[in-house]
Image (cartoon, grey):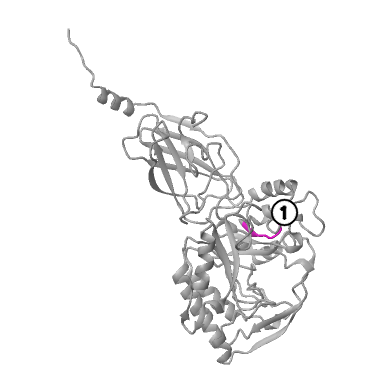
Amino acid sequence: MVTIRLIPSLFASILILHAEPITSPLLEGPAPVDNPLKGLVPYATPAKDRFPHSMEFFYIPMSDVVKAPGKYDWLALEKRLNDIASRGNQAIFRFYLEYPGKNSGIPEHLIQGGLKVHRYTNTNTAPFPPTEVITPNYEDPNLRKELTDFIAAFGKRYDGDPRIGFITAGLLGTWGEWHTHPRNELFASKAVQREVMDTYEKSFRTTPILLRYPVGEKNEQKAENAARPFGYHDDSFAWATLDTGRKQDDWFFIPSLKTAGPTAMDRWKTHPIGGEIRPEAWGVVFDPSPPSPVQSFDRCVTETHVTWLMDTGMFREKAKPERHARAIEAVRRMGYEFRVTSVTLDGDSLEITLVNQGIAPFYHPWPACIGILDPSGNNPLKEIPISNKLTGVLPGESAVWRIQLPSPVPPEPVILLQVPNPLKNGKPVRFANRTQDAHRSGWLTLIGKPIPAGK
């Protein structure tokens, strides 16, 4: 009679190697409304606990940075970026030269060097009282060189900075919004506009740049931008967004996209759409029946595929519970929303299927990360960076990630997924699944037994 002895450690290894694949369908759950790089955006340093958000906006005069030709002091920008980052948020901002009622953003040395400026009362500040604005002569060669040199230095220093979510191009026009209405004759020529766009295009390859107006080839005053790699921002959102069919409203955002052509209409697929809710629509846009001419927020979101919107209505005072609840659901629809639909673990091969059930892509190339715990969920998390990214997955599309895990995978493992925020204390991307944060805050549990109650 022959006796066979099995070595326990070897037997365990055989079981692991020949274990049946684990398939785990994941249930849907609500994604957080303050997911990174999307949603409502307050002006910097907002009051606490008004509305969930992951970004903050500010204006900054060009004169705060440009001190002399080719000489820059970035301290004012650094302070703003660091302050916002200290709250775990990313910044959106805009440099300007002219802003009604504020000191000029024009570098003083340019004026001393002969740059002519126009001082006049701006009547386009309704519903606020008209106030003085200072518009430079945009055709001045020294100003033009200063603009392009500054943008190049700006991009060299800040392109890809994790503290920055988006940049609106700014610099030209009132509030940096690329118009001087109603004094249209004072606005920059097409040649100056092209110089600014050319330099932004060369200087920023990672951080998204957004322009105020979609423009095709036949616009008399504005230079064509429909073929350029920029997003757009609609700063009259839910007021002058939808196509009304009226000729006088052809400057509204959706009609402007249509006029600019199919490339501009599809811009959201590769470059972000942002903007600002129009002041007249603040707050009331989230009510069941907003007053006319406030446009449907849901329809504006659907047609523009907007990712983020500056807003004051939900941040200047605490909203009533009913309005707050409606705003949460409406804002959650903005931008991306990812849900993992199924996971299969076969030995050390992991397959993840996810779907984008939002209305826009994720535009930043943040790589994902796998986490592994033992079955207790108590041991230190083993983090495994992977090359997979969320970028390029359009709304309604699925992606399948096939990942080779380092061997050996522990028996009955707890496997987690995260798309970490490169900002040190920034919010990670969180998924629309019930097991989000189940074992570790900020991580989606893909495979693993539920944590017993009380632990």
| Circle 1 Cα neighbour tier, 10 Å, few/some/many (<14 / 14–19 / ≥20) | many
Residue with the most extreme top position: 1
x and y, in percent, of residue 316 in the image: 70, 59
Is the residue 92 above or below the residue 200 in the image?
Answer: above
299 or 135, which lies in front? 135
Front residue of this view, candidates 70 and 438: 438
On the image, the x and y values in percent for residue 285 come to 75, 55
| Residue 312 shown in magenta | yes
Q: Residue 220, percent across and down?
A: 68, 77
Q: How many marks?
A: 1
Question: Along the line of sight, which residue is nearer the eye, 390 or 261?
Answer: 390
Visible residue check, residue 370: yes
116, 107: nearer the viewer: 107
Amino acid bearing label 1: Phe
Q: Quadrant of the N terminus?
A: top left
Q: Which residues are magenta?
A: 308-313
* Quadrant hosting residue 173: bottom right
From the viewer's perspective, is residue 74 above or below residue 236? below
Residue corresponding to mark 1 = 297
| Magenta stretch holds residue 400 | no
Image: 65 above or below 83: below
Residue name at image x 50 percent, y 69 percent: 78
Residue at x-position 19% and y-position 11%? 3
Secondary structure at badge 1 equals: helix
Instruction: Give the farthest residue toward the right.
Output: 292
Determine if residue 226 is in view: no
Residue 93 location (% of width, % of height): 58, 67
Within the image, what quadrant is residue 309 found in? bottom right
